Image: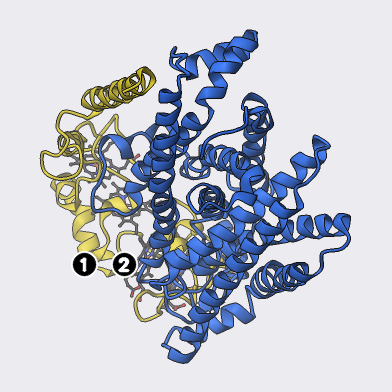
Amino acid sequence: MEEHTQHLFEMLSQVDGYIYPNELDLQWGILIVLYPYITGLVAGAFILASLERVFKVKVLKPTYHIALLTALSFLLVATLPLVSHLGKPLRAIEIMITPNGTSAMAIFGFIYLWYLMVVLLLELWFDYRRDMVIWAQQMKGFKRFVYRIFTLGVNDLSPKALRWDEKLGYFITIIGIPSAFLLHGYVGFIFGSVKANPWWSTVLMPVIFLFSAMVSGIALVMVVYLIISYIRKMKVDMKCLDMIGRYLLIALILDFSLESLDQIHRIYEAEESFEIISLLMSGQLTYTLLVFQVLLGTIIPLIVLTILQFYKKNIRLRQTLYMVVGFIVLIGIFFMRWNIVIGGQLFSKSFHGFTSFKLQLIGSEGILMAGLWLIIPIFILAFLLWLFPPWKKTEETAY
Amino acid sequence: MPKHIRRLLLLFAVLITLFIIVRQVLIPDSFGQFGHYRGLALEENKAHVARYVGTDICAECHWETMELKTADMHAEISCETCHGPGWKHIEEPEQGQLTIPEGREFCGTCHSRNPARSASLIAQVNLSDHNIETNCSECHNPHAPWN
């Protein structure tokens, strides 16, 4: 057999039924799965932080700054999976230079920049300015240098200046909430607006993305908080942890209901695409959807979190359970993104066939690359925690 | 307004101005001339030499081959489909030599049996048992298969 036909046969063995030639290869791989995953973590962590500040849930205080720093470290890498997927990093600037106003994807650069510069960095700045001024006087070397730059050379700690900080910080958190909704709702919109793809095209998509973002962000902050406490041998504030657990439970219930609503709607409508979608869910996506996303990422956490609402005895056990729940929820949401991104490309537009997705280990679209983009934010977070330790902040902030 | 807020506003003003300047510098001159792209890109593309020159030109010198071909089953196929782009050859026939395809595999790219191709559109043979002793051109003239 000639070489090209041999290659063709190899490819065809990965296909079921009838597909169009250009559907053989999946264009969006694991890096595109990471993109909504990471932005979701950012939005979710920020919303948890704003609960404390805007909605005055005081018990969440110990996690306020951790949540903001977590959001920042993940936001800093949020675009990098996209850039490395596209493979032309030098051209990335062009969506800012010559923006295309009618393309939903092209506007992301500005939404991202708004969120990074105006919301997160400013909020952290107003929060930390007082401490940076103090630290700059106490410390030497690199840290002092960095604080000097970040304070913009102003050492004004008068009550008036501090009141400005606080007012503006509060104001920015308020802007931040709709911005966080915008950031992630927008990512959902990109998928939800692909009208050619019945698996993606639903108006509920941005809302589902938002709630799953909250779920993953809250779970992430919970895990980070537990790990930091463990490493620093600090006592975990159980009131705070329980409260996070409660919000996680609420977010999970809302997320689960919305997604179920979406599915029920699909099942009842049973449009012409329904047959292929039900085959997709019971075939190609069995493990990632039913086992990882629904069972591991939703049902088990729902049960455990509900029990933890009533069970208040053994503190150790509760912490361990929260930790485990946090992790499996994070895995579950990852697979939720997976099922959307990869799942939406597995079936043919003809609705009569499937292709399959093979995940590589190495290479620019492989597991290792994806792992890199998930590990880098953790290092950034460690660095930020070292540079701006929330536990060294001077207390008695007025708000 | 406290000093640090003024500094902050200044910083933002500087950043935004910087962005606007960088943008001015980086936007290509002809951008937006016709649409959301670099207008000069069209000129650049136009400046490329066409590599495929078409069958009519070949006929000016190879009229015999042309006559042969037009009279038979390969009439519809352009010379350059088999011989490759002729942009150099038409100017300097001796220097810019064209490829002369050979071997059974070559004819097979179109004629080998493939169930995905409709047999009513193109005749197909099984390369591994249709007169395997010799080259196709021993019996079929590539320019006129039944000649």
Front: mark 2 or 1: 1
Residue A59 image position (x, y, % from top left): 64, 51
Residue A42 image position (x, y, % from top left): 53, 47
Kindly identify the amino acid type of the residue bearing the numbered disc 1: Ala
Cα distance between the residues tagged 2 and 1: 9 Å
* Quadrant showing the N terminus of chain A: bottom right
Q: Residue at x 19, y 50 (%)?
A: B54
Asked which quadrant contains residue A293, the reply is bottom right
Q: Please identify which colour was used for chain B in the image.
A: yellow
In the rendered image, which residue does mark 1 sit on?
A: B71
Mark 1 element type = loop
Residue B84 image position (x, y, % from top left): 33, 46
Kindly identify the amino acid type of the residue bearing the numbered disc 2: Asn
Q: Are marks 2 and 1 in contact (CB under 8 Å)?
A: yes
In the rendered image, which residue does mark 2 sit on?
A: B147
Above or below, A262 against A330 in this view is below
Above or below, A292 against B120 in this view is above
Q: Residues within 10 Å of mark 1 (few under 14, many from 20)?
A: few
Chain hosting mark 1: B
Above or below, B42 against A177 in this view is above
Asked which quadrant contains residue A372, the reply is top right
Count the marks. 2
Q: In the rendered image, what is the letter of the chain coloured blue?
A: A
Q: Which residue is nearer to you in this view: A380 or B137?
A: A380
- The reply to whether residue A82 is visible in this rendering is yes
